[in-house]
């Protein structure tokens, strides 16, 4: 039995995928590494098959017609045989020692019959341009080294969103919620960490710097210029998030508040980039997005408006738009995104 399946979506990743794979291999037979070649034109699949031949029973290489990151995540999940499932992007890597520590804890709990729906660990921004690191932890928001529920959750800081980098789901949770990420769409990681949440009842947080998130490559989807060009993709994902759950109907108060915070963050990111573009068309798109939220659920829109950034993101004046952009730049400096 595999305790953890790690899906690695790869597209033309031959140059750097080795580090991701080799950060997992020392964990041995406890793990299953699923290398998903998303229709690459380089040696990605060949490299994957070489690892499969060298580590039979640990590495599995599959290929598919290009469908984008979300499609590759889906394929990894469909092939997963582990009790838990995690995604590792091909240009990122794990701290191997932290991963071994986490797997031992997961095994101990699983073997004792304790069912945990989601494990959380820290992630680290590894900025190649500045050489700096920024650790995002959850120490003020979550109890450490114990099974807990949403009712025991503390206060989340602005920087403490649960992201794909920080979560390990019980595989059945992802299947029970019917998770299926859209093809040929960027920013699907937001769906991955939002849609399953009402199906998550038990959690476990370890203060380990597990995931190393590599930023600074010019072609990354989180690069500001690329995000600006792909704003329609961001809007699409935000609308999927809006439609995925009726937040007022979620009975657990802490879960509802967190999901509202996350939706507000999504609305904020879209609004900021539309305001930065500052054209008649982009400002109209911002109005349409907020109208979409109000039409989908007036009560959810009210909940978002009560969040810190809800109303400011809708300011229409020239001065208001300047405040939005300044606030965004300040947050990037504070939280180490750039």
Image (cartoon, grey):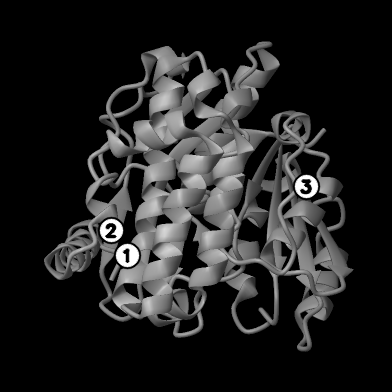
Q: From the image, which quarter does the N terminus lie in?
A: top right
* Residue 303 percent coordinates (x, y): 36, 31
Element under disc 1: helix
Image label count: 3
Of circles 3 and 2, which is in front? 3
Residue hosting label 3: 77
Of circles 1 and 3, which is in front? 1
Name of the residue lying farthest toward the bottom: 42
* Residue 257 percent coordinates (x, y): 38, 27
**Would residue 40 be visible to someone looking at this image?**
yes
Q: What residue sits 65% from the left and 11% below the top?
A: 112
Q: In terms of depth relative to the viewer, which is nearer, 73 or 45?
A: 73
Question: Could you classify mark 2 by the number of other residues whose Cα lies within 10 Å: few (under 14), some (14-19), or many (20 or more)?
Answer: some
Q: Quadrant of residue 277?
A: bottom left
Q: Choose the circle earlier in sequence order: 1 or 2.
A: 2
Residue hosting label 2: 134
Q: Choose the circle earlier in sequence order: 1 or 3.
A: 3
Q: What residue sits 60% from the left and 18% below the top?
A: 109
Q: What residue sits 62% from the left and 34% below the top?
A: 196
Q: CA distance from mark 1 to mark 2?
A: 23 Å
Q: Is residue 256 left or right of residue 2?
A: left
Question: Residue 272 bears which disc, if any?
Answer: 1
């Amino acid at each position: 039995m595999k305790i953890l399946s790690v899906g690695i979506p790869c597209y033309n990743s031959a140059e750097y995928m080795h580090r991701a794979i080799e950060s997992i291999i020392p964990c041995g037979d406890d793990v299953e590494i699923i290398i998903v070649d998303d229709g690459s034109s380089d040696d990605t699949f060949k490299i994957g098959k070489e690892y499969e031949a060298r580590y039979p029973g640990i590495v599995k290489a599959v290929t598919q017609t290009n469908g984008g990151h979300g499609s590759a995540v889906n394929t990894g999940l469909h092939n997963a045989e582990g009790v838990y499932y995690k995604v590792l992007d091909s240009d990122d890597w794990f701290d191997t020692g932290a991963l071994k520590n986490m797997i031992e804890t997961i095994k101990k709990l699983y073997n004792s019959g304790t069912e945990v729906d989601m494990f959380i660990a820290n992630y680290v921004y590894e900025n190649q341009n500045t050489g700096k690191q920024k650790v995002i932890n959850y120490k003020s928001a979550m109890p450490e080294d114990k099974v807990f529920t949403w009712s025991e959750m503390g206060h989340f800081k602005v920087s403490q969103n649960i992201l794909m980098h920080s979560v390990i789901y019980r595989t059945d949770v992802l299947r029970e919620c019917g998770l299926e990420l859209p093809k040929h769409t960027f920013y699907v990681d937001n769906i991955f960490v939002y849609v399953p949440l009402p199906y998550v009842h038990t959690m476990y947080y370890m203060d380990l710097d597990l995931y190393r998130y590599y930023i600074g490559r010019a072609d990354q989807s989180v690069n500001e210029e690329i995000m600006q060009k792909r704003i329609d993709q961001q809007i699409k994902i935000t609308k999927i998030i809006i439609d995925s759950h009726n937040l007022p109907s979620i009975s657990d108060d802490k879960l509802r508040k967190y999901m509202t915070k996350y939706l507000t963050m999504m609305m904020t990111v879209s609004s900021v980039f539309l305001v930065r573009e500052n054209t008649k068309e982009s400002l109209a798109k911002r109005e349409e997005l907020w109208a979409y939220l109000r039409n989908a659920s007036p009560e959810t829109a009210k909940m978002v408006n009560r969040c810190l950034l809800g109303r400011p993101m809708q300011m229409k004046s020239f001065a208001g738009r300047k405040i939005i952009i300044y606030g965004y730049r300040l947050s990037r400096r504070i939280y180490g995104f750039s």
